[in-house]
Amino acid sequence: MTYIYYKSSNYTTEPKISEKQMDEWKHLATKKNWRITQLPNGFYQTEVNKPDNNDSWVDITRRETMEGAEAAINGSVEHFSKKLEYIKGPKVVKTFK
């Protein structure tokens, strides 16, 4: 007879994420901190402003279309929002009686 061992994780303690990292994720998860610029070659560049200096922008991705650039921003916002949700611990999706 063969027994299969499954290891499970317990999330009773919070993940060790620094306050600085959490602040950065919150900044990246806010769509108003993003913008799209058009480059001389016709491509569109997504940029996010620096948390400590709102006048300074950092380029992130380049896309061929405006729709592609906006989709990239939406994907980034969703990604960092999920990271922030993960910090809260596991989410109960179903219980049984």
Image (tube, rainbow, N blue to C red):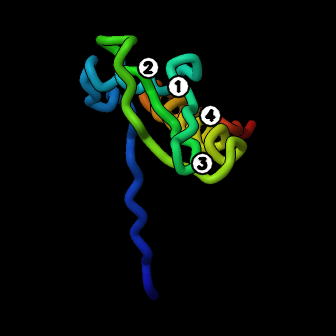
| Residue with the mark numbered 4 | 92
Q: Are marks 3 and 2 in contact (CB under 8 Å)?
A: no
Dots 1 and 4: beta carbons under 8 Å?
no
Indicate the amino acid at tag 3.
Answer: Gly
Find disc 1 in the rendering and name its residue. 34
Q: On the picture, is 33 further left or further right than 70?
A: left
Whole-percent x, y for residue 18 in the image: 24, 24
Q: Which residue is mark 2?
A: 27
Q: CA distance from mark 3 to mark 2?
A: 28 Å
Up-down: is 75 above or below 7? above
Q: Residue at x 62, y 34 (%)?
A: 92
User: In the rendered structure, which disc, 1 or 4, sits on the residue that comes first in sequence?
Assistant: 1
Q: How far apart in space, not on screen, are marks 3 and 1 (Cα)?
A: 19 Å
Judge depth for marks 1 and 4 and give the one in front: 1
Give the number of the mark in front: 4 or 2: 2
* Label placed on residue 42: 3
